[in-house]
Amino acid sequence: MATAQGQQWIRLSPEKTIEFPTSGANASVTVNLKLTNVSGGYLAYKIKTTAPRNYLVRPSSGVINPQGDAIVEIILQANATGEGGPPTNDRFLVQVTPTSSNQPPARDQWTTIAKEHIQDHRLNVVFKETAGTPGNALPNGVRPPQPGGA
């Protein structure tokens, strides 16, 4: 989203979609989100999700130096892909606002910032099947019979 003047303050990588592999294993998976400050000043950011029990976001807020980068780890919790399969409608919201220092605003200060001074960037979550899973796992985590074994 651009400002009223049409300029972007931040660039995200990935830009629109965060992809998590689904391997059948019930383990946590980490994906990196790169935030690049393309403005000439400090930017404060915070990241929210529609499913806070399924993900850890580290760090979930901070400040990016002018023309600098921040790498944010988004960790899919091991229990998030339970018996019903992976979540289908999870999303993330990255909010950024200019700030005068390298100190992030307090959590409650975000509510006092005028909406025209905040850019929102939405990311969808997609789960992709992975090829070559450990042990040649079949769909639903079923493994082929082992030679000479049970």
Image (tube, rainbow, N blue to C red):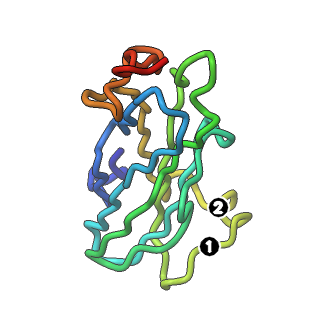
Q: Quadrant of the N terminus?
A: top left
Name the spot of residue 21 as percent of width and height, x first. 37, 34
The residue positioned 26% from the left and 30% from the top of the image is 132
Q: Secondary structure at mark 2?
A: helix
Is label 1 in a helix, a strand or a loop?
A: loop
Answer yes or no: do the residues labelled 2 and 1 have beta carbons within 8 Å?
yes
User: How many discs mark residues in the rendered view?
Assistant: 2
How far separated are the C-alphas under marks 2 and 1?
A: 7 Å
Looking at numbered disc 1 in the image, what kind of residue is underneath it? Answer: Pro
Q: Which residue is mark 2?
A: 110
Q: Is residue 123 above or below residue 61?
A: above
Residue at figure coordinates x 55%, y 65% from the top left: 61
**Please, which residue is most extreme toward the right here?**
108
Residue 150, position as x, y percentages in the image: 49, 17
Front residue of 8 and 28: 28
The x and y percentages for residue 139 are 40, 14
Name above or below for residue 33 compared with residue 22.
Answer: below
- Residue that numbered label 1 is attached to: 105
Q: Nearer the viewer, residue 141 or 65?
A: 141
**Apparent side of residue 7 relative to residue 139 in the rendered image (left or right):** left
> Residue flagged by tag 2: what amino acid is it?
Trp
Quarter assignment of residue 16: top left
